[in-house]
Amino acid sequence: MPCLEMKAAALPRPVPATRLRALLERPGAAVLRRNYVAEASGYEDAHLRNRIRIAAILAVNLTDPPNPVDAETPGPPLLDKKEAAPPSAAPGDPLAAGFAKGLEIWIADGDRAVCTIADADEIPGALAMFDAYLRLTRFPPAFERLDQRLVGLHYWFREGLSIAIQGRPAEAPPLEETFFDCLAPIPEIDDFREPRFVVRLPDEGLAFFHDLLRSASTWLDTNSFPNILGSR
């Protein structure tokens, strides 16, 4: 059966690649956060639930908040009063803005754990990968190729987290003469120049991660800048 493979850099990138991380790590900023821990019903395996946690985050820079601060404050003529004004990036710093929303994805493996930040606009791409997987499950020949590691699905977040759906990893490394016969299109050999944190979960982990991602996405779709200030 296919498995969910997650790879993340052991150390965070030296420079933020997402608006949310840039805002959270902005020097001298007083940041107000609102968190929602995504939940998925029907998964009672504590071991599985302890491996992955996804938190949806709204964050605003109180030192330099976007305008208008009050959702009821009239905006420009073309701006809907029900929507907050889009945050404007600071000159020379395209990622740093007064407001950002996205995810904290926590992955644990024994005593080790890693957290990766993702912007909200990255979620649809990840969900599209899971949608493609569900389509494969309804087409037995393609699903069989996936299980045999001849087909793979992959999505790469900006901060370096890689999630992939592929056949169950072999317990023993392949022989030299059969190496390319059992290697999936997804690169499985880590770059030795960059230490990686790798976690593989069985097929139940696929649905669990997918449901967590959808739960967080739904919350972010209905919560935005006015919600974090309590004006909506």
Image (tube, grey):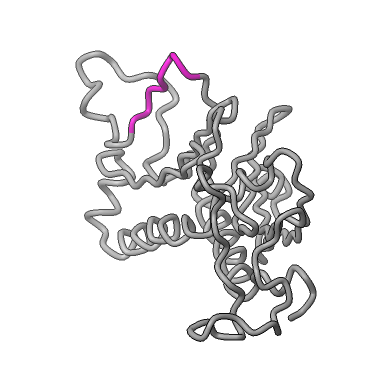
Image location of residue 186, percent across then percent down? 32, 36
Residue extent of the magenta highlight: 187-194
Residue placed at 20% from the left, 16% from the top?
177
Image location of residue 193, percent across then percent down? 44, 14
Residue placed at 37% from the left, 41% from the top?
167
Vertical arrangement, residue 139 with respect to residue 119, above or below: below
Q: Is residue 18 left or right of residue 84?
A: left
32 and 103: which one is in front?
Answer: 32
1 and 75: which one is in front?
Answer: 75
Residue 54 is a magenta residue: no
Image location of residue 59, percent across then percent down? 70, 57
Residue placed at 28% from the left, 15% from the top?
175
Image location of residue 50, percent across then percent down? 71, 45
User: Residue 171, located in which quarter of the rendered image?
Assistant: top left
The prevailing secondary structure element of the residues shown in magenta is: loop
Vertical arrangement, residue 86 with respect to residue 146, above or below: below
User: Residue 61, located in which quarter of the rendered image?
Assistant: bottom right
Q: Is residue 128 left or right of residue 74?
A: left
User: Residue 179, located in which quarter of the rendered image?
Assistant: top left
Residue placed at 52% from the left, 37% from the top?
200
